[in-house]
Image: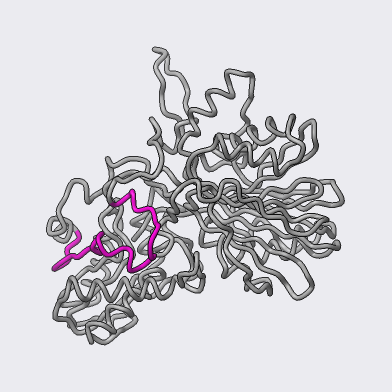
Amino acid sequence: MSLHEECGVFGVYSPEPGDAARLCYYGLCALQHRGQESCGIVVNDDGLFVSRKDIGLVHEVFPREALFSFPRASMAVGHTRYGTTGAASRDNCQPIEINHQKGRLAIAHNGNLSNAAELRSRLELTGAIFHTTSDTETIAYIVTRERLTAPSIEEAVSRAMDILEGAYSLVLMSPRKLICVRDPHGFRPLCYGKRPDGTYVIASESSALRAVGADPVRDVDPGEILIFGPDGILSRREHCGRCPRRICVFEYIYFARPDSVLDGVPVHAARIRAGEVLAETHPVSADVVIGVPDSGLDAALGYSRRSGIPYGIGLIKNKYVGRTFIAPDSRADQVQIKLAAVEEAVSDRRVVLVDDSIVRGTTGEHIVGLLRKAGAREVHMRVSAPPFLWPCYYGTDIDSSDDLIACHHSPDEIARMFGADSLGFFPPDRLRELAGEGFCSACFDGRYPTRRPESARKGRYEQRLSVSGREKEGPT
């Protein structure tokens, strides 16, 4: 079971004032799977920004009375966060708001900058004072500094893109414009759609567009800057084609909702194909195929179809418990609360258990144990991702190889550690069958599209000096 997550960004632009906050709320609900640590909404009330941000799920941060306290507005930007850089604190909640000489700015960001530490150090040496520990504030500083000499906010964004490296899908709101940006590699998804009333909606995934009644128009191209304003929609493409396209392949394996379409590839179809490939490369004699909810279910169905082994519901997820990463110090306990085995489906049977990934290996033993306790005669694990062997610098919460179980143990050893009868990973050389051409798989093969940063540790900005003067890691 994977232990990492992404952020979700959402934006609303309407020609006339309306329920922008409500649309943003429903959009964030549809993106809740991308981040369950914190969330926020900022609306633009004729140039005045009104916001609410806090730790918690969307429905917790925005009860009915809070949602209806927002003014009617024509623009809004929202964010659901799982912090791959920066501590879980209210200071790091997004969207980040900036007041500067040329006006207000709100920014929501999905991804990680690979040169964030370098840029932050450079800014601090010139007098910048940071109030958060996330990469997003670095982006905000660079954009606002460029805005001092740029003729427009979109020109400032374009100049900032010459400086930024790594993954960033952004939605920015100025007093008069809503701007969405995708980095030149296109690491993280971003798309936009249109509602029948003429309202434009920007979202990390197409599923969130449909959740607010918008028809998807298209994906934002890697390197593209889209400006929604009084003059209509303007596309700036000076950064397009500057770098090879490299969308994160793990979006298709785990991050995205199965009803989303990313860069023309349906996520559900990609996961079905993952299961088919697993059945081809790691066949086994068994009585039933089950998946680990939620992102292992589609791959399990694909395994069943290709192998001919019946598909069953062997694990039930408690829908009122969030993903296991929410309580990083008690993942094993979370599994006990979150999942339950269906004894009738697995008792005295040879079970193929399909999961989306194995990262640190902290939950596999407990999941296999649930099935054994329910009477499973054999448990054969199949994983729809290759082994994680390298850290990720683009938004996945894998900041070091130290704790990656596949770096230190073979599949047979991991199977024994989990109490499984066998274990098979998705073959890395067949990833293009899931995502087509032009994807990033650096966490599997170490081939990074950008320079590698000196440090990618999540808590690298939460540091304090010990008595001896040496750096001491703070809370993460």
Q: Position of 217 compared to 113: left or right?
A: right
Q: Quadrant of the C terminus?
A: top left
Q: Residue at x 48, y 61 (%)?
A: 322
- Residue 200 or 471: which is nearer the viewer? 200
| Residue 341 in sight here | no
**How many callouts does the rendering have?**
0
Residue 388, percent from left and from top? 28, 52
User: Which sits in the foreground, 323 or 85?
Assistant: 85
Residue farthest toward the top in the current orientation of the protein: 468
User: Up-down: is 155 above or below 235?
Assistant: above
Is 409 or 217 nearer to us in this picture? Answer: 217
Corner quadrant of residue 57: bottom right
Q: Position of residue 14 (x, y in %)?
A: 79, 62
Question: What is the span of residues highlighted in magenta in the rendered image?
Answer: 418-444
The scheme the figure's colours follow is: one colour
Where's the N terminus, which quadrant?
bottom left
Left-right relation of 203 to 77 = left
- Front one among 15 and 411: 15
Q: Position of residue 379 (x, y in %)?
A: 19, 72
Q: Is residue 2 above or below residue 421?
A: above
Horizontally, residue 164 falls left or right of residue 69, namely left
- Inspect this view and state whether residue 248 appears: yes
Q: Residue at x 76, y 46 (%)?
A: 174
Q: Does the magenta-highlighted stretch encompass residue 222?
A: no
Residue 460 in the image: x percent, y percent? Answer: 45, 32
Q: Measuring 17% from the left and 56% from the top, which residue is drawn there?
A: 414
